[in-house]
């Protein structure tokens, strides 16, 4: 494994983000950029509602959540999202009054995007736990777009197994219909279930969404834009259904280290089960397994990041920039 990288200075990270989001030939940026210290102050008096044992349960395979990370990064975000949810509920109420309708509340939908191994799942779990503690929206659900991947048999038929996770490997129409039903306030909406253990959709298994106050949708390409038709026909994007979106960002070289570390950790744990899809890697020597993991990263995941995921970064409402130790050093919030 490569050596550990040192954490980037927060002010330097914020300055670099300002450069990224404000090209030299423009005099403005659509984002306000905060270093870690400035962002942490926006927590105000938001109480810490997660116990240490819960932090252990919410942590990822290689990302151990600290109290500091929750207090300085996630509590300010939780406070911000709570304000957004309240404003959205009020807007919905006045709109339905104007239309003379009696619609019930519709879910506030949050999208979480970013590369494989960047920490999307951890962020989504933490936000779910924190947002459910607020009194005005106690019911928070979380779903990943992995469930909307085509089954492996269909990917094989289409010649897409080596492009699993790329936009074309998803049943986008099914995902759009699911989000439309949720956003329409339907009572019972079903979604397919994906197993990372089996690396496939689980036949016959469904996850049911029952009109939550908030739905968090986590996935690689959730901010992807469709190709627009010349005739101006309606082409919905997945992100059209989002009220707020978050992009998890880090240097690709750093994400590579995380991907390799996670792969090798799983090789000595979950992959040892004979029923695991990746069980064949458990019996390989360390060097051969590491080399294969590097191939998977560079041939599939890095390519997907560069071609499809990273170009969507500036479509997000908020961008969290992480450094090598999984610490968020800066946050960029889109201006209203």
Image: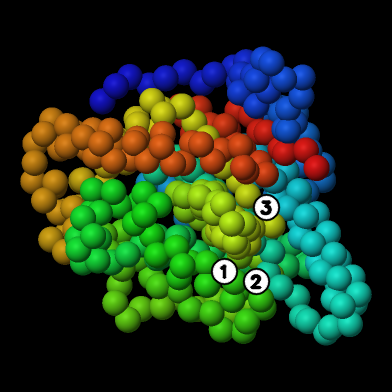
Q: Which residue is drawn at 46% across and 27% down?
A: 251
Label 2 or label 3, whichever comes before in sequence order: 2
Q: Name the residue under label 3.
A: 244
- Whether pointer 1 and pointer 2 mark residues with C-beta atoms closer than 8 Å, the reply is yes
Q: Residue at x 66, y 41 (%)?
A: 318
Residue 163 locus on image (x, y percent): 28, 48
Label 3 environment density (alpha carbons within 10 Å; few <14, some 14–19, many ≥20): some
Q: Vertical placement of 279 versus 211: above or below?
A: above
Label 2 environment density (alpha carbons within 10 Å; few <14, some 14–19, many ≥20): some
Judging from the image, what secondary structure is the residue with disc 1 in?
A: helix
Q: In this view, does 93 lie to the left or right of 276?
A: right
Q: Mark 2 points at which residue?
A: 183
Residue 200 locus on image (x, y percent): 27, 64
Residue 326 locus on image (x, y percent): 49, 34
Among the 4 quarters of the image, the one containing residue 274: bottom left
Q: Separation of disc 2 and disc 3 at Cα?
A: 13 Å
Residue 70, can we see it?
no
Residue 223, can we see it?
yes
């Amino acid at each position: 494994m490569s050596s550990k990288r040192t954490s980037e200075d927060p002010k330097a990270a914020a300055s670099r983000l300002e450069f990224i989001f404000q090209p030299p030939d423009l005099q403005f940026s659509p984002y306000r950029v905060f270093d870690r210290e400035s962002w942490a102050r926006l927590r105000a008096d938001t109480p810490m509602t997660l116990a240490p044992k819960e932090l252990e349960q919410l942590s990822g395979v290689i990302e151990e959540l600290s109290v500091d990370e929750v207090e300085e990064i996630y509590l300010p975000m939780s406070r911000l999202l709570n304000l957004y949810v309240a404003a959205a509920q009020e807007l919905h109420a006045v709109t339905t009054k104007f239309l003379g309708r009696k619609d019930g509340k519709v879910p506030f939908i949050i999208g979480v995007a970013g590369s494989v191994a960047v920490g999307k799942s951890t962020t989504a779990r933490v936000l779910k736990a924190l947002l459910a503690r607020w009194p005005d929206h106690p019911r928070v659900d979380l779903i990943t777009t992995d469930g909307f991947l085509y089954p492996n048999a269909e990917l094989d038929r289409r010649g897409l197994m080596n492009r699993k996770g790329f936009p074309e490997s998803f049943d986008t129409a099914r995902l759009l219909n699911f989000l439309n039903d949720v956003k329409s306030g339907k009572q019972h909406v079903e979604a397919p279930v994906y197993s990372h253990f089996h690396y496939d959709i689980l036949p016959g298994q469904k996850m049911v969404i029952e009109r939550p106050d908030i739905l968090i949708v986590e996935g690689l390409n959730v901010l992807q834009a469709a190709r627009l038709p010349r005739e101006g026909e309606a082409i919905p994007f997945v992100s059209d259904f989002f009220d707020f979106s978050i992009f998890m960002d880090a240097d690709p070289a750093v994400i590579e280290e995380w991907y390799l570390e996670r792969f090798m950790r799983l090789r000595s744990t979950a992959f040892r089960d004979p029923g695991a899809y990746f069980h064949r890697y458990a019996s390989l020597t360390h060097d051969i397994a590491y080399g294969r993991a590097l191939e998977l990263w560079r041939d599939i995941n890095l390519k997907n990041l560069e071609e499809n995921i990273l170009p969507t970064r500036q479509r997000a409402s908020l961008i969290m920039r992480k450094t090598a130790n999984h610490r968020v050093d800066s946050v960029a919030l889109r201006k209203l």
